[in-house]
Image (spheres, coloured by chain):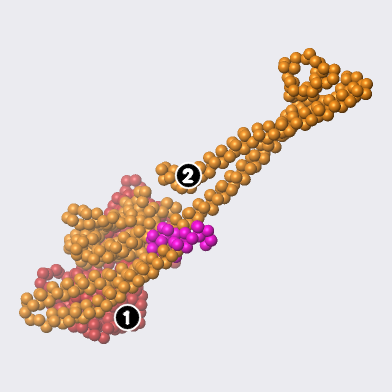
Amino acid sequence: MRHWTASHDHKAWFLQSRTRILLVEDHPELGPSIRQALTREGFEVILAVTLQEALDCLIQGPRPHLIVLDLSLPDADGLEAIRTLRALPLTDPPPILILTVYRDVDLRVHALEMGADDFMVKPFAIKELIARLRALSRRGRADHRGPVAFGPLIMDPRDRTVRLEEKVVSLTPGEFAILRRLAMAGGGPVSGSDLGEPRAGDPISLSEGAVRVLIHRLRRKLSRVFGDQVLIRWNRLEGYRLEVRR
Amino acid sequence: MTGWISSWRVQYLAIALMGAITVYLNLFLTLPGEIANLLGRQARAHQEATAGILSAYIRARQSSGVAVEEALREVSPWLREYGLYAMPPDFPIALSGVSPLGITLTDGRILALGWGKGGCPSCMDPSFWFRLLGISMGIWVVLIAIHLLLWIRFSTWLDRIRRAAQAIAAGASNPPLPPPSRDELGQIARAMQEIATSQARFRDAYRRFLMAAAHELLTPMNIVIRELEELHSLLTSEEARQRAERALEHSWHLQRLMEDVLIAAREDRTSFPLRLEALDLADFLIAMVQAYAPRFEAMGRRLELRLEDLPLPVRADPTRLRQILGNLLENALRYSRAGDSVYVIAGRGERVMVEVQGGVFGERSAGTGIGMYIVEELMRAHGGSVEFLEGPDRILHARLIFPLDRSSL
């Protein structure tokens, strides 16, 4: 993954390192005109007019740094397209910016929940699109959406499932957040209050009472499916610790 | 407590019970006396008539030479049965417990009418009183039952009409009215249905007008914007470009307003009935905040969720909930500045409370307020409410209040 160095002179910054954008837009005029505007601003743009073309490009071509996705494509339902793109087994999935004609909040929330990073409603000012794309590419992608492994335990935040060998358990958002925090500690102990602290990419702060409730629920679910293969141990001095046995 | 006392049903029941007690006291205390009195008078008349017949018989026996004692012995069974006493002429009647009224026989004796057993033979019988008690109790129970039936029927109707009125107030076009009947209650129900129908018709017309107006205005607006963008790209003078940009910004704002009006008209909640289900608002908030945090981050803001309690059980429609929170977060994003932090704080007490702090509403003049109008309407439909609070730096916070779903605790 590339690491950009922030510069106040955007033009110079983009000349040093061109950001590659995969633009998925089927509108015969809008697609080329966005491409033209973005190219003028120093982006390298690959235009795809169907989801299939976009997938081919992602798998075979040079990996884009950002995806701009129109939600009304001829060969896919908008939200389905996000799901398909996010389901690709990419080690470094690029951020997705959605273009849509719908202003419905519900659709936006759905899109974000499915793994989109930002969206813009058509018609939009090209200046704003460029600003958003810059922000997205500058942010880099501290990815919190790909699967996380803890020994043989695989945690997938996309559908909040935990897998151990053949057994799968599906968790609520709260339970998953706690389990991931325990896993991030690498098997080391974490105190209840530390477990409740928000962290980069995981902006949830939980009271100690809430942590206790979530741990209780999590233990019940894990033991029902994994038996004593996955345990959350606790002692008064150190706190909680995740333990996985093969 | 006052609510309970002021309830119409309680008041009516109290009045009905008082009435029933009065009726019962009347039946039990007055009526038996009256009956006894009646029976006593009847017995007295029988006694007097019998005394007359017996004295005539005794006189007839005397005239045929039979001694008075002999004649009295002959009629003694009737004397006993009717409580009649043959007294010597000098008998102190006033002290004897027999009536001073009597029939004087030929030898100066008095055939006196006694007050005793003969007065009312059945009045002395305890089973008579039990029977009387049973009858009065029976009448009383029937009266109470009729009262209760009427009360149940009327209060059920009242309950239904109350629910229907509330539904009409909430905008329902088909309120759950009581079944039709021909009486006055049926007329009230029919009138309420008419109110609901005309209200729905008016709302529908209003909504269609709004949608049509917004639509009609949007089309030329889009052309204006396209032309302005074209013009902007053609301009070479810096000042002219700046002016065109300002005109463009205002045009976009105007376009957003119209689109908001369109959405508000389309999102009229009466056209989308709520599908309530028991859910944990905490899980919902975690998913929402996790989805929105990258967007906030991309625009230089910070979004954080603070969960004070868990679970946060509510009955809500997930789609609508997403709309409520999405609207608040979108506004927070729009009206906060780069570097700002927006906090979503959630906890529960008697109710479930969610507070979104930091530029939720921004300055009133800058926004359309239609997003917030939708939030208000949807919260009301969920039986909750939303409050907008002014915080430091003139930033408005939003506080959502949901009824706590105790059954899921």
Give the residue at mark 1.
Answer: A73
The answer to whether mark 2 and mark 1 are in CB contact below 8 A is no
Q: Position of residue A122 (x, y in %)?
A: 25, 76
Which mark is drawn over residue A125? none
State which mark lies toward you, 2 or 1.
2
Instruction: Give the color of chain B as drawn.
Output: orange
Towards the viewer: A135 or B158? B158
How far apart are the alpha carbons under marks 2 and 1?
Answer: 66 Å
Local crowd at mark 2 within 10 Å, few (<14), some, or many (≥20)? Answer: few
What residue is shown at x 35% (from left), y 49% (from top)? Answer: B349
Instruction: Give the color of chain A as drawn.
Output: red
Q: Type of residue at label 1? A: Leu
Towards the viewer: A229 or B290? B290
How many numbered marks have been drawn onto this rendered protein structure?
Answer: 2
Q: Type of residue at label 2? A: Gln
Give the residue at mark 2.
Answer: B11
Q: Position of residue A214 (x, y in %)?
A: 37, 54
Q: Is residue A221 visible?
A: yes
Task: Give the side of residue A88 with respect to residue A131, left or right.
Answer: right
